[in-house]
Amino acid sequence: MNLNTATGDRADVALPDAARDKRYLFGPVVDFFCLGGVSFLVLPVLLLIPAAQYELQFSSFMLLLANFINHPHFAHSYQLFYRGFRSKAFTRELGAGMQARYLFSGIGVPLLLVCFFAFCILRGDVTLLGQGGNIMALFVGWHYVKQGYGMLMLDAALKRNFFRETDKKILLVNSYAVWIAAWLSANAYVASRQLAGLQFYTFDFPQPLVVAAQLAALATSAAAVWAILRHWRASRSLLLNGIMAYVVSLYAWLLFVRINPLWIIVVPALHSLQYLIVVWRFELNVGRSETARDGGAKQSALARMLGGELAAHLVAFAVGGLTLGFIGFWGLPMLLNMYMPYDQALFGGALFVFVSWIFINVHHYFIDNVMWRRENPDTRRFLFS
């Protein structure tokens, strides 16, 4: 999530009492744990568990849990992005710049990905397809650091405690430096891995490049600490939840994720939880807006059963996310595996599961980069209302 909406150069920290409920997404405790604080509870426990003995059972449990946390997090981004897509992409309603972004991310990127996968499959190029998995890892890292940075900027906006422009640039540069260092390090230390039965190939980067990236991450991390301390001294207020989200996203979930095999397995769920709390605040505000607009309309049967239009709206959104998540990650790829002919001796028995997971992961980062921008009026209207 790239929350570039929450930017500014002021350090205006005084808020009237009536606005205190708007200083958080759902409250100080819920925000803390969902934005990353649960990591401080989970990681110490995982370090005490014999990873080699329980890795298989733990993987199975997290794979089941993914249907309720990880996969809906991806599905919700599709629900938000393609809602009203025709007017966003084919009119100048949002301006030429946003229109181009919607067209490229909503149509161009999926077409490019389909062409890439078709080329690999028709050519029988297992290595190139496996390297596509590594490219997915590159986008995963990009998404993690941009979401961590965005959460810090969001916390600053909610509390009207804005960073200086120079401090924001330092924090953003550090995010990118950590991202590149993490990806290069993973390529240097992990030769290959398996995903849905296919090899996930890495690239052979020269060691001096890896070391240089690690040193850059160290230097920019020190600069980021200085920027945060300077902001704290200037504003006399510590953005605890935002800083915590920034730190765990960059370091605990990315740069040092290999600290424990079980930690690697659980981190995607923690990242998804961080995303979901923002999406649900956004969708709650959308539902309130629609309820207020249609206040005199006749309630649907679902609304009457659940006690109101807002409850019906949120249940429909949740069920839609669960359903789309299952279809995208399991239902559709399993059907394609059954009915689409391909060389199973070459690609294995779960080719389209591999393809689908990479497609959704990569596409998710592009559509997120469109939705969560300061230029997007939906974000300005519903995230901070």
Image (spheres, rainbow, N blue to C red):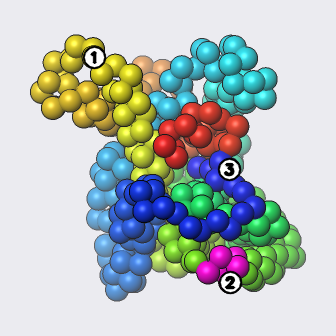
Q: Is residue 270 visible?
A: no
Q: Is residue 34 above or below residue 257?
A: above
Query: Which range is magenta?
Result: 231-236
**Residue type highlighted by circle 2:** Arg
> x%, y% of residue 188?
72, 70
For label 2, count other residues whose C-alpha is less than 10 Å away and answer few (under 14), some (14-19) or many (20+).
few
> x%, y% of residue 220?
78, 76
Gap between marks 2 and 3, in whole Å?
Answer: 24 Å
Pointer 1 residue: 296
Gap between marks 3 and 1, in whole Å?
Answer: 36 Å
Residue toward you, 44 or 377: 377
Q: Are marks 2 and 3 in contact (CB under 8 Å)?
A: no
| Dominant SS type (magenta) | helix
Residue toward you, 314 or 115: 314
- Front label number (2 vs 3): 2
Pointer 3 residue: 4
**Residue type highlighted by circle 1:** Gly
> In percent of the image, x 37 and y 62: which residue is there?
27
348 left or right, relative to 359? left
Pointer 2 residue: 233
Q: Is residue 92 visible?
A: yes
For label 3, count other residues whose C-alpha is less than 10 Å away and answer few (under 14), some (14-19) or many (20+).
many
52 left or right, relative to 372? left
Gap between marks 2 and 1, in whole Å?
Answer: 51 Å
> In percent of the image, x 33 and y 81: which residue is there?
45
> In percent of the image, x 60 and y 14: which residue is there?
86
Q: Are marks 2 and 1 in contact (CB under 8 Å)?
A: no
**Residue type highlighted by circle 3:** Asn
> x%, y% of residue 305?
12, 27
Q: Is residue 247 above or below residue 311?
A: below
- Name the secondary structure under disc 1: loop
329 left or right, relative to 210? left
